[in-house]
Amino acid sequence: DTEVTQTPKHLVMGMTNKKSLKCEQHMGHRAMYWYKQKAKKPPELMFVYSYEKLSINESVPSRFSPECPNSSLLNLHLHALQPEDSALYLCASSQGGTYGYTFGSGTRLTVV
Amino acid sequence: KQEVTQIPAALSVPEGENLVLNCSFTDSAIYNLQWFRQDPGKGLTSLLLIQSSQREQTSGRLNASLDKSSGRSTLYIAASQPGDSATYLCAVADTGGFKTIFGAGTRLFVKA
């Protein structure tokens, strides 16, 4: 299995809702990442997990809460989001170091 | 702070043309450089990964070069096809290999 799987593909949520995004990989990669991408902009790094521990948080607001329950799974818990948080959320994994990234197909999030 | 720039921002070419996409970065202390393709609203597909010690990589009609000392990489696409129409993103990984910075991308349109 050489894929990163993200669910759901699309999500519409209200500003008072709580929802979660899920990301899964079975390549044995030791690092997993969350990126946010707005339309016609490059992906922006949000969080990095290395060996299931949070190693980088790019000053992301606390309404985004990452979780790495095991080496294959990465979640992003969402609460009290704003309309400007609407974006494509991308998950990636890698072996770290000199190895490249494998990206999932993303979750298109709309906050209403 | 690493900055990645891609030129041109957009490119329209007739089918069959050979073309070059450019990527420049400000800090030469990188682990690797990766070229991705992104179709509208989709995730990122890895095209080529160049390690910091390498000068180029080839895959089919694609060839990527890296000149770390000058902070430049190019992606050469031979005999372009309409199916090559997409946004091409350049990304550089820092020396830890866990933080990757993306350029803004080049939007390519190949006319049939």
Image (spheres, coloured by chain):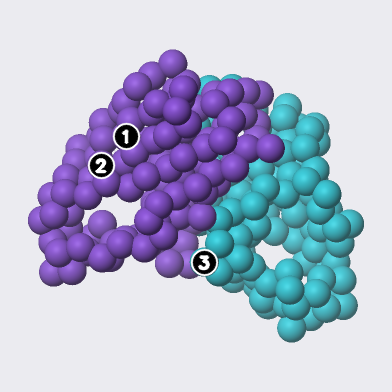
Chain colours: A cyan, B purple
The residue wearing badge 1 is B64
Q: Residue B31: which disc?
A: none
Which residue is rendered at x = 16% and y = 49% of the image?
B18
Chain of the residue where label 1 is placed in the rendered structure:
B
Chain of the residue where label 2 is placed in the rendered structure:
B
Q: Amino acid at mark 3?
A: Lys
Q: Which of the two discs, 2 and 1, labels the residue nearer the N terminus?
A: 1
Q: Quadrant of residue B60?
A: top left
Q: Is disc 3 placed on a helix, strand or loop?
A: loop
Q: Quadrant of residue B27?
A: top right
Q: Are marks 2 and 3 on the same chain?
A: no
Q: Residue B76: which disc?
A: 2
Cα–Cα gap, marks 1 and 3: 23 Å
In the picture, the quarter occupied by the C terminus of chain B is bottom left
**How many numbered marks have been drawn onto this rendered protein structure?**
3
A3 vs B15: above or below: above
Cα–Cα gap, marks 2 and 1: 6 Å
* Residue B67, horizontal then vertical, whole percent: 40, 26
Direction from residue B40 to residue A18 in the image, left or right? right
Front residue of A27/B30: it is B30
The residue wearing badge 3 is A40
Which residue is rendered at x = 62% and y = 23% of the image?
B95
Q: CB atoms at circles 2 and 1 under 8 Å apart?
A: yes
Q: Residues within 10 Å of mark 3 (few under 14, many from 20)?
A: few
